[in-house]
């Protein structure tokens, strides 16, 4: 065994040839790191609180956004994505444009179209009774509707019945959910068979049905629908639809979309707005971005504060536990053992807070989603990412106090 | 100028010097140990005694590899420790030296067995083996019936016996006890002194550091320190 010449720093014989290094098994290292926390549970809980809140916010944000997305997807699956609407926009002059009288019939003639329906707005107003001040219309529009509207849009009847060829000729109305609410006509009232009437135009109309809120055509919720013929007979309706609804097979939606405007209004296709309501619904799920951003920001700040809290706890802990450090050095702990102990403790504190936070975040998501009638969806990656972040926070928070503990000279640590 | 190093000595110090505040002003420079030479043979039970400020703690820290000398040679069980780095010194402490402190330094949340087992924590011995050996060590110090008691449930004398068990659990070649009776009443002190004699009789080499000459005289050898110099080194006649 020849030693290189340059070791003249060490003039004496090789000292540790026979001596194994001090060592601490990984399991023991973990136990030692967690022990300090177990000895002061209240402090551990308090210092993990900030982290817990931060992770709870992050998990809840992701959970709620995923849950609402799942809700929208469920809704879309139920409602379908094959409904298109063509609406008369504003003409060049600025006044409300009209669609041709035969627009619905034209749309029905497009090959892949399965169903088509029209809605035409009237100038009539609707009131609870004939004594209400005519200016207080309550924002309820009166629209003529074709009988095919219910099936085309997928309207559900909350109570009563839909317009039929017979009832559509007479002064009868079906109210959207919001309109019924504003007019004080409840589904129970309709179901009870009590004749319900509203003052519509300049005569009494019998309410024969109330609709559920519509997922794809929310504009119908605040409207009173009357039969096409009745509108022409009693409300001076000119027969021009303002919106045409149509459905086709999913595969042909795009093809229909391309020709819809020209079909509905061959003379002024540019004035027609074609839209797919399911797109708007899907987009709505993403429109809470500002709120999400705010919560994410709060979560990040909370994590930062939590990290500072853990760092602070560790600094105090190192100061208080000088003798323990000294004892461990005397028992053979290396600087690295001491550093890892305190680093491990910081990570344990942080991760414990993170686990509590993840549980809290899942709970918040579950409660909120249940109250909103959403499915509960907390993606695993969010929990994994949250816990990953807490490990990182723990390491960053622990690195300074841990290296201070490690640098402490054994003699200084043992002196009181 | 001094005897050649004894290869088999547990401790061999030659011209050991420790200066504090070197590099600072001349006024702040303190020579805590001044060329101390000393050997401790296996199986000895010695007291290191001297008044306050004489350098006892400084010498004990060097002997315990908690500090490194400014100059001189120090061998522990044949290992030259005067030039070792921090990791190697840690290894020497883990395998070669047992410590007993005046303040016991027990972990209040752990049982007696767990505290004693910690004496082997940094030697890479499996947890179960540590516990088995800790139980045996507690039997040796007469606390076989207090295995699962926590320090708070033990008397001062019993606590120090737990600490002594922790120092001897790994059968280190050298045990250093710093004022082991300093926090104890006279009866407990007597018990601890008796225990040290018993352990020594079983072969353990022990150095007791104390300022108390009366205590020191209860051990076979007294090394007297004053102003960083050994002024007397005598074997008891009794
Ligand atoms: N870290 C240090 N820095 C500067 N001087 C020190 C340091 N440690 C010890 N000294 C000095 O070295 C001398 C010896 O101190 P030491 O602690 O070894 O004495 P002691 O014999 O243990 O005394 P006591 O019985 O009071 O504990 C003293 O003068 C002390 O002031
Ligand atoms: Mg001292």
Image (cartoon, rainbow, N blue to C red):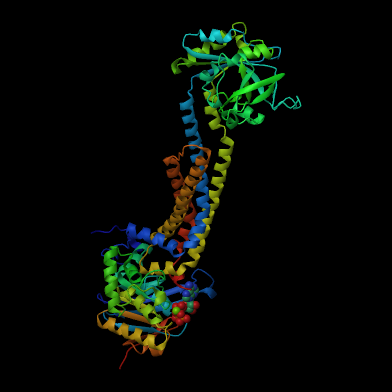
**Hey, which quadrant is residue B100 in on the image?**
bottom left
Image height of A334 relative to A252, above or below:
below
In this rendering, the count of numbered labels is 0
Write the residue at 28% across / 81% down.
B199
Q: Nearer the viewer, residue A191 or A294?
A: A191
Image x and y of residue B30, in percent? 49, 76
Q: Is residue A165 visible?
A: yes
Q: Nearer the viewer, residue A298 or A260?
A: A260
Image height of A260 relative to A67, above or below:
above
Image x and y of residue A301, in percent? 56, 47
Q: Is residue A214 visible?
A: no
Q: Is residue A391 left or right of residue A283?
A: left
Image x and y of residue B235, in percent? 31, 89
Image x and y of residue B221, in percent? 32, 86
**Hey, which quadrant is residue B184 in on the image?**
bottom left
> Quick one: which residue is furthest to the top in this view?
A267
Q: Is residue A42 left or right of residue A195?
A: left
> Quick one: which residue is furthest to the bottom in this view?
B238
> Quick one: which residue is furthest to the left in this view?
A1
Q: Nearer the viewer, residue B22 or A319?
A: A319
Q: Quadrant where the N terminus of chain A lies?
A: bottom left
**Hey, which quadrant is residue A324 in on the image?**
bottom left
């Amino acid at each position: 065994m020849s030693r290189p010449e340059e070791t003249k720093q060490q003039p004496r014989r090789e000292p540790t040839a026979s001596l194994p290094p001090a060592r601490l098994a990984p399991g023991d290292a973990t136990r030692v790191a967690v022990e300090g926390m177990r000895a002061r549970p209240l402090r551990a809980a308090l210092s993990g609180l900030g982290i817990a809140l931060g992770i709870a916010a992050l998990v809840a944000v992701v959970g709620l956004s995923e849950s609402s997305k799942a809700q929208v997807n469920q809704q879309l699956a139920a409602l379908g994505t094959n409904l298109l609407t063509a609406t008369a926009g504003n003409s060049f002059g600025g006044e409300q444009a009209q669609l041709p009288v035969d627009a619905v019939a034209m749309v029905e003639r497009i090959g892949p179209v399965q169903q088509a329906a029209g809605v035409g707005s009237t100038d009539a107003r609707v009131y609870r009774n004939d004594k209400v001040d005519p200016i207080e219309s309550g924002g309820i529009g009166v629209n003529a509707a074709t009988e095919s509207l219910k099936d085309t849009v997928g309207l559900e009847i909350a109570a009563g019945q839909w317009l039929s060829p017979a009832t559509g000729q007479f002064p009868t109305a079906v109210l959207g959910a919001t309109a019924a609410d504003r007019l004080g006509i409840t589904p129970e009232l309709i179901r009870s068979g009590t004749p319900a009437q509203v003052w519509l135009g300049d005569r009494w109309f019998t309410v024969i049905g109330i609709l559920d809120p519509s997922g794809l055509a929310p504009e119908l919720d605040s409207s009173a629908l009357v039969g096409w013929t009745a509108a022409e007979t009693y409300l001076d309706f000119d027969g021009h639809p303002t919106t045409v609804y149509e459905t086709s097979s999913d595969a042909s939606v795009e093809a229909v979309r391309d020709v819809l405007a020209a079909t509905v209004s061959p003379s002024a296709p540019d004035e027609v707005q074609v839209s797919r309501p399911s797109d708007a619904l899907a987009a709505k799920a993403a429109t809470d971005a500002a709120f999400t951003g705010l919560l994410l920001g709060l979560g990040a700040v909370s994590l930062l504060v939590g990290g500072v809290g853990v760092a602070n706890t560790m600094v105090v802990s190192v100061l208080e536990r000088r003798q323990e450090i000294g004892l461990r050095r005397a028992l053979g702990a290396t600087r690295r053992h001491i550093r890892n102990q305190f680093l491990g403790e910081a990570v344990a504190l942080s991760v414990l807070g993170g686990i509590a936070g993840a549980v809290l975040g899942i709970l918040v998501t579950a409660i909120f989603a249940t109250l909103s009638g959403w499915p509960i969806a907390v993606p695993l990656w969010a929990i994994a990412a949250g816990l990953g972040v807490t490990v990182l926070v723990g390491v960053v928070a622990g690195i300074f106090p841990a290296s201070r503990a490690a640098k402490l000279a054994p003699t200084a640590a043992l002196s009181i | 100028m001094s005897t050649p190093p004894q290869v088999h000595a547990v401790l061999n110090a030659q011209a050991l010097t420790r200066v504090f505040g070197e590099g600072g002003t001349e006024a702040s420079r303190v020579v805590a140990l001044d060329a101390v030479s000393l050997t401790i043979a296996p199986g000895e039970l010695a007291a290191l005694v001297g008044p306050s400020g004489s350098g006892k703690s400084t010498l004990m820290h060097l002997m315990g590899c908690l500090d490194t000398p400014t100059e001189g040679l120090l061998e522990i069980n044949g290992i030259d420790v005067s030039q070792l780095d921090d990791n190697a010194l840690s290894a020497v402490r883990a395998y070669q030296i047992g410590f007993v402190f005046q303040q016991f330094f027990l972990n209040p949340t752990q049982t007696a067995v767990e505290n004693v087992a910690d004496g082997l924590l940094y030697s890479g011995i499996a947890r179960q083996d540590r516990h088995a050996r800790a139980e045996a060590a507690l039997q040796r110090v007469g606390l076989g019936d207090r295995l699962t008691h926590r320090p708070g449930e033990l008397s001062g004398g019993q606590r120090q016996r737990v600490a002594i068990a922790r120092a001897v659990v790994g059968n280190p070649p050298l045990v250093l006890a710093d004022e082991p009776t300093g926090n104890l009443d006279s009866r407990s002190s007597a018990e601890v002194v008796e225990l040290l004699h018993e352990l020594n009789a079983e072969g353990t080499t022990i150095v007791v550091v104390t300022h108390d000459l009366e205590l020191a005289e209860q051990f076979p050898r007294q090394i007297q320190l004053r102003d960083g110099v050994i002024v007397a080194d005598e074997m008891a006649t009794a």
